[in-house]
Image (spheres, rainbow, N blue to C red):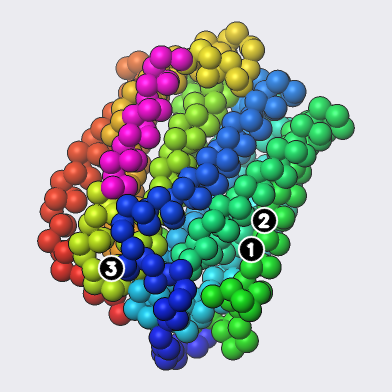
């Protein structure tokens, strides 16, 4: 591994990245976040529609089987998020410091890391798939659906890792609209193939997985073509395809926050699924399916906020690297207000129209009743979730990995996990649902304290080398 410090030529002033330091913050946030929001919303809508296809075309237990795969998908996404978020943040900061060569080396390391980790996960996942699914709460009734889905998803994991990681770098290097089209292309391919494979060919849940896998491969090819193009501002170059201990360390340390968020989300999902199976009695499998529905709805709004955060990230990172702290705080405040409004809108829809929302996924009366009640409870504290998610991502965007990690872990492990273990003893299956909004409220109060405490340190500017 090379640890050589790379020299840094000046970034061309004609490139899009330099807009980040001079144009109005509000205009930039709109320019960078809207493509990301569109892409993330489209991906989330695909997940909702895909579950609707599976629920209506395969059956309610298929939704439960799909919900059981969520912890594994979170585990695989954890590594992709770690590399993608760490690399994109480092690219933004390095471009803000006018170090294009360093940014190019980061790009090469991103590709290598994704290939190594993605291939490892695929091999181990396929070998130990059934024991993992049983440990995560699968029953004899739901195992066939979960296994059939994940076998195909794991085969495409290598491509998905690189697609997600490189797409983040594409956005950070000044191509937000192209990054948006990356997501939209995968969604269009997915939505076009899924109903064909499920309803026409009769391939069931394997058809849904195959549609997803093909879409991920198409997305990978799209981003690879971008970075192979020498006209792209940041592109693959000979001499930059060797791992640097310094760069890998920076990527992993900054990306550790979203990595731990996904790992803890996987752990929490396992606990939720097993608790629902245990306290749900004969309705345990359907309760897991209800959680799959509720999670899909909640994730739609969370992903919109994530898209907003992705728009904030290059602006905050670039200006933090350039020590323009007034612009850093300005983009944070604008993102915070918008993110809170988005999750508040989600809360209102869940409270006012829960039966309509659940009806999109299933016409099974029992599953519908469980999911409707769960939706109202789980999204009760949703208005404060936007604030917590934006602030956590903001710390990551300016390279303050430790604080971002702390806030990520506090929400999942310190507040939510104890509630999931304790509340069901008193309120049964409803205790599982109640633990989620309680954890959100306490975590948001802690986040408010932390951002007030850290404000002066943020205003002091970067310490990252």
In this rendered view, identify the residue nearer to me: 36 or 110. 36
Residue 38 visible? The answer is yes
**Where does the magenta region start and end?**
334-353
Task: Please state which of residues 278 and 459 is positioned toward the viewer in this rendering.
Answer: 459
Q: CA distance from mark 3 to mark 2?
A: 31 Å
Disc on the earlier residue, 1 or 3: 1
Earlier sequence position, callout 3 versus callout 2: 2
**Which disc, if any, is residue 223?**
1
Q: Which mark is residue 260?
A: none
Pointers 3 and 2 in contact (CB under 8 A)?
Answer: no
Name the residue beneath numbered marker 3: 320
Residue at 32 percent of width and 68 percent of height = 21
Q: Which residue is mark 2?
A: 219
* 401 on left or right of 371: left
Tell me which secondary structure the magenta stretch mostly adopts. helix
Residue 217 is situated, as x and y percent measured from the top left of the image, at 72, 56
């Amino acid at each position: 591994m090379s640890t050589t410090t790379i020299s840094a030529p000046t970034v061309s002033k004609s490139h899009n990245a330099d807009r980040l330091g001079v144009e109005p913050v509000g205009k930039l946030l709109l320019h960078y976040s809207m493509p990301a929001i569109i892409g993330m919303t489209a991906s989330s809508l695909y997940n909702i529609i895909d579950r609707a296809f599976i629920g209506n075309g395969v059956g309610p237990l298929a939704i439960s089987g799909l919900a059981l795969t969520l912890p594994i998908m979170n585990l695989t996404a954890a590594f992709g998020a770690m590399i993608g978020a760490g690399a994109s943040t480092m690219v933004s900061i390095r471009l803000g410091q006018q170090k294009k060569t360093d940014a190019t080396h980061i790009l090469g390391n991103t590709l290598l890391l994704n290939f190594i980790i993605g291939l490892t996960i695929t091999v181990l996942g396929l070998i130990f798939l059934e024991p993992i699914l049983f440990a995560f709460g699968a029953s004899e009734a739901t195992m066939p659906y979960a296994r059939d889905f994940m076998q195909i998803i794991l085969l495409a994991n290598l491509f998905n890792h690189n697609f997600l990681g490189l797409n983040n770098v594409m956005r950070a290097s000044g191509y937000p609209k192209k990054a948006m089209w990356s997501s939209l292309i995968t969604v269009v391919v997915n939505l076009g193939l899924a109903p064909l494979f499920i309803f026409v060919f009769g391939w069931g849940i394997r058809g849904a997985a195959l549609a997803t896998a093909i879409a991920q491969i198409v997305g990978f090819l799209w981003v690879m073509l971008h970075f192979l193009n020498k006209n792209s501002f940041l592109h693959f170059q000979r001499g930059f395809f060797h791992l640097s201990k310094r760069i890998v360390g920076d990527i992993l340390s900054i990306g550790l926050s979203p990595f731990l968020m996904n790992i803890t989300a996987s752990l929490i999902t396992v606990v939720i699924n097993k608790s629902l199976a245990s306290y749900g009695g004969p309705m345990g499998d359907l309760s897991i399916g209800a959680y799959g529905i509720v999670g899909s709805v909640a994730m739609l709004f969370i992903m919109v906020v994530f898209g907003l955060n992705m728009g904030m990230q290059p602006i905050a990172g670039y200006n933090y690297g350039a020590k323009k702290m007034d612009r850093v705080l300005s983009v944070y405040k604008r993102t915070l207000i918008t993110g809170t409004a988005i999750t508040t809108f989600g809360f209102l829809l869940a409270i006012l129209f829960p039966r309509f929302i659940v009806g999109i996924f299933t016409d099974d009366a029992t599953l519908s009743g469980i999911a409707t009640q769960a939706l109202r409870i789980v999204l009760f504290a949703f208005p404060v979730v936007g604030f917590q998610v934006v602030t956590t991502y903001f710390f990551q965007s300016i390279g303050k990995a430790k604080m971002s990690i702390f806030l990520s872990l506090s929400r999942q492990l310190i507040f939510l996990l104890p509630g999931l273990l304790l509340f069901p003893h008193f309120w049964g299956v409803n205790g599982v649902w109640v633990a989620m909004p309680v954890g959100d409220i306490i975590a948001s109060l802690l986040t408010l304290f932390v951002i007030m405490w850290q404000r002066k340190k943020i205003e002091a500017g970067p310490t990252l080398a």
